[in-house]
Image (spheres, rainbow, N blue to C red):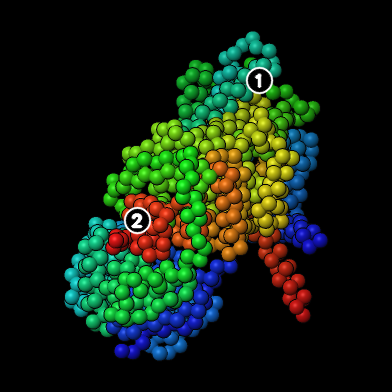
Amino acid sequence: MSTALQAVGIVKSYDSLVANDRIDFDVRKGELHALLGENGAGKSTLLNVLYGVLKPDAGTIYVNGKKARITSTRDAILKYKIGKVSQYSDLVPSFTVGENILYGDIPNKYGFFIDRAKIKQTVGELSRATGFKLNAETIVEDLSVGEQQHIELMKLLYQDAEIIFLDEPSSLLAPQEVKKLFVLLKDLIRKGRSVIFVTHKLEEALDCDRITVLRAGRVTLTEERKEVSKDILLKAMFEEKITVASRCARQEDKKRESILEVQNLITGEGTRRGNLKNVSFTVNRGEIFGIAGIAGNGQKDILDVLTGFLQPKDGNILLKGKDITASLSPYQLRINNLLAYIPEGRRTVGSCLKLPISENLIMGVGRMSRFYPNGLRDTREIKRFSRDLIEEYGVKTAGPNAKASSLSGGNLQKMIVGRELSIETDLLIVAQPTYGLDFKTAEFVHKRLIEKAEEGKGILLISKDLDEVMKVSDRIAIIYEGELRELSCREVDLDTISRLMVGLEQDC
Amino acid sequence: MKNDAKGQIEVVAQIGSFMLSMLMVFIVFSFLIVISGFNPVAVYQGLIVGALGTPGALGQTFIRMGPILFCSLGLAVSFRCGMWNIGSEGQLFLGALAAAVVAIYLPGVPKVIHIILAMAASFLVGGIWAGLCGFLKTRFNANEVITTLLSNFIAIWISFYFLKYYLQPKWAFNPSSLPILSSAELPIILKGTLLHGGILIAVICAFIVWFMMKKTSLGYSIDTVGANKIAAKYSGIKVNRIILISMFISGGLAGLAGMGEVLGVHHLLIRNISPHYGFIAIAAVFIARLNPIGAIFVSFFMGAILNGGRHIQIIMGIPTHLVDILVALFVIFMLLQPLLAKKIITAWFTNFRKTGED
């Protein structure tokens, strides 16, 4: 089999984060190739480089053995016959199947009217050629998500794509639909096309012909399907991660007073993967309780409920022993300084980019009386406070009056961490605190969190970064498909955690 | 040291781009005057004389500035809260109606108190009217641009309805009310002109709004909600409440514009109380970059153009549309100015770097 697409030494970095670190990757003609890795392993970046969305810092791409210069998605499709089905649908829901497949190339009559007969004819031909039943007149939004994905594939076939990328195609599909998708893909490769299947699920990777595993921007394994087992893949996905011993062991026997108790929490109808199905846990004083898991397994619902944005369907939330489920709102939590919160979206949720840094630092209505005694601004106090915080957290900026939008991602995160840690509260909820930060800044944030725990505060940490959870947490739980599984100290090892993260039950 | 140099360049770029914008307005407008068959020199002369030439002309400029300033201040508050209130015109009409009712039908009240009562009524009615659109936003998430825009027409016709069926005397041939009581008239502040005290109230309001936005927790909350609603909500601000308050203040200030026209200019309620002051203010407040103090100067400038424009129209027979075009050009190039400033700064630095490398 000859090589359809080959990438050599691809490097792509953002600020200080290296998303792709000298990646070598190839797909053969007629091959179904799985690209496996956790969130943030660099899969999407690689895909975007190969598809002409991102420009790599270094590296060469070959298509059919010839050096290729893919500078736009237009190049990818027209010149190199590379097509991509993105994670979320690119179809126009209110258009018909025919209009979507021929999008950008709609035949017309007299240069003005849409030629529906021609559309129908073209779709008919495509249907015969692929052996896949298509009705050109169906409106796309009437189709199921799985069927819509098939239409996207058909669209690529119409565009004559030889190399097809699928970015996490199964994330929105029911299990039966995933099976159907694989039947279709196997058919495609039999006809000589190449498919790259991006996923973080082991089972799906094991259905492919060859597997490449990415971890932290590097290729850790490329092997034929028959040469690998689940254990080998797990090792490639997570190995070397546990560089720091967990804080777990030394905390074991201490009895602690609880701050936050979550009991039997249920959200939504339980139909989505991210809905909570009976989640209970406790956060105690003086400890960091870490929840690890692959994104989209219910982390968002936990955060939304605890910050007062989402009313749970069932379950109770106890703060310092008091049931506050009914009165949970951001205002109530903040005005009484019950909660400090470092959110995941530092630009969307955590800050007001249009406002100066000082205005960002004083956010939180519980402190309004300090900075606005009797409703009037205490300019001097605000200035002093922001200067101190900027210095303490090493935020690189021209000064407190500079707009928050002038800060880099890392400095913005320092600003938010500094703000939330300066709020006098017993409970701190932290989501992805070091996402995209360089090593030194991440270390700094971790140190601060541990200090706060040692001062006697309770911290709930939710992170996709397993390394981080292992490093700073006193107790660890894994979330998978809306269910939480707390680990006892002797269970905290790589094997157990990685299995739980991808939904495999333990053998023992 | 390096920061100082950068700051200086920024100041130079700001001033330079402002002059450039004005120059462009000048060039384009001169071109239009010439192809319309007029003499540009005479037109500009007429504009300036008509706007500032005599005490009377200056007084008229201030009179036109007043309602634009009131509306701009209101818009600054709602825009900074992220509420795109396009309903100043309607709020002005209802404010005028409320002020007229108090000013005509409340006899025996001492002068200052009568004026204050009329102000309160116009503020309250304008504020509630705008607050209604705020409520539609917070309760049903109805787009405020649509609701406030449409509310203009409703408000203008409500005002006309009350004028025609209640305020207008039976014998009237024109839709206009009885004159207001003399105790409610705003005093003349410049002898020999018609300039009334409304402009002083407007300027005082500008400083009050500036103080509120800059120095109070309410202003802080409004700015935060306007910058990022989600972040504001997470920080514990009651976002819906702030939206309602900002809309109330916004409509109230527009209502005061109507009060000024009734108590200061016409001394009665007429059907067409405002020649689109509420819409002109939208342009003015953007040029002032939502700054209340800046709005004072921009409103004055807008008043001058309108007044000078009227003058050349009467004296030289220049079509009204040409004056409208002048206002439009001014708005376009002033909104372009920040972009120009940025270009100048970038060009400067690239140039600097190049010479540095050589």
- Could you tell me which chain the residue with mark 2 belongs to? A
Task: Give how far apart the Cα atoms at labels 2 and 1 are.
Answer: 68 Å
Q: Quadrant of the C terminus of chain B?
A: bottom right
In the image, farthest residue toward the top? B108
For badge 2, the amino acid type reads: Tyr
Taking the spot 31% from the left edge, 52% from the top edge, the residue there is A272
Q: Dot 1: within a 10 Å radius of its alpha carbon, few (fewer than 14), some, or many (20 or more) residues?
A: many
Q: Nearer the viewer, mark 2 or mark 1?
A: 2
Q: Is residue A267 visible?
A: no
User: Horizontal placement of A438 versus A38: left or right?
Assistant: right
Taking the spot 41% from the left edge, 64% from the top edge, the residue there is A494
Q: Is residue B249 visible?
A: yes
Q: Position of residue A247 (x, y in %)?
A: 50, 55
Q: Position of residue B224 (x, y in %)?
A: 58, 43
Instruction: Report which residue position mark 2 lands on.
Output: A480
Taking the spot 75% from the left edge, 78% from the top edge, the residue there is B357
Q: Is residue A344 above or below residue A365?
A: below
Instruction: Report which residue position mark 1 lands on.
Output: B115
Tell me the element at label 1. helix
- Could you tell me which chain the residue with mark 1 belongs to? B
Taking the spot 69% from the left edge, 41% from the top edge, the residue there is A382
Q: Nearer the viewer, residue A73 or B320?
A: A73
Q: Quadrant of the N terminus of chain B?
A: bottom right
For badge 1, the amino acid type reads: Ile
